[in-house]
Amino acid sequence: MKISLKSISVGVALSTLSVAAMAADPIVGTWQTYEDNQPKAQVQISQTGSTFTGKIVAGNTEKAKSFVGKTVLTDVKAAGNGKYAGKAKDPRWGFGLGADISVSGSTLTLSVPVKGSQTWKKIK
């Protein structure tokens, strides 16, 4: 069996593309949320297809611990250049409001027009 240099080059190129495609989006991971500059809860953001979802996975206060398992970000889609848009859900009431999200390095800024904004820090 004879393998040509062209076949090897194509294989390497495809492997490189596969690795790049598997690289996690910057929003994917676990983020520490804050309220009044105090750690509140940890939200894990995961990707399914082209959308992202955020779920509370740990609480830093007794109240926050009661919300573990609640989804707080839904229908989040990448808009390019570290920007995202979707819905933020208050775990107390469960309804979602439009939200703009930006990620820069290990900092995520969540902005909800009628509620203001929060800054989260990536921990995983």
Image: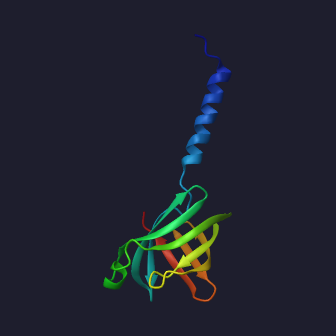
Q: Quadrant of residue 37?
A: bottom left
Q: Quick one: which residue is furthest to the top in this view?
A: 1
- The picture places residue 53, in percent across and down from the top left corner, at 52, 66
Colour basis: rainbow
Q: Is residue 31 above or below residue 25?
A: below
| 36 with respect to 77 (left or right) | left
Question: Which residue is depicted at the point 61% across and 57% down?
Answer: 50
Residue at image point 48% right, 85% down: 93
Residue 15, placed above or below residue 26: above
Query: In what quadrant of the picture does the N terminus appear?
Result: top right
- Residue closer to the observer: 4 or 62: 62
- Residue 62 percent location from the top left of the image: 31, 83
Is 65 positioned to the left or the right of 106 in the image?
left
Q: Is residue 25 left or right of residue 66?
A: right
Q: Position of residue 22 (x, y in %)?
A: 54, 47
Residue 41: x and y, percent? 40, 77
The quarter of the picture where residue 70 lies is bottom left
Toward which corner of the image does residue 4 lie, by quadrant? Answer: top right
Would residue 81 be visible to someone looking at this image?
Answer: no
Give whichever of 67, 11 is nearer the camera.
Answer: 67
- Whether residue 108 is visible: yes
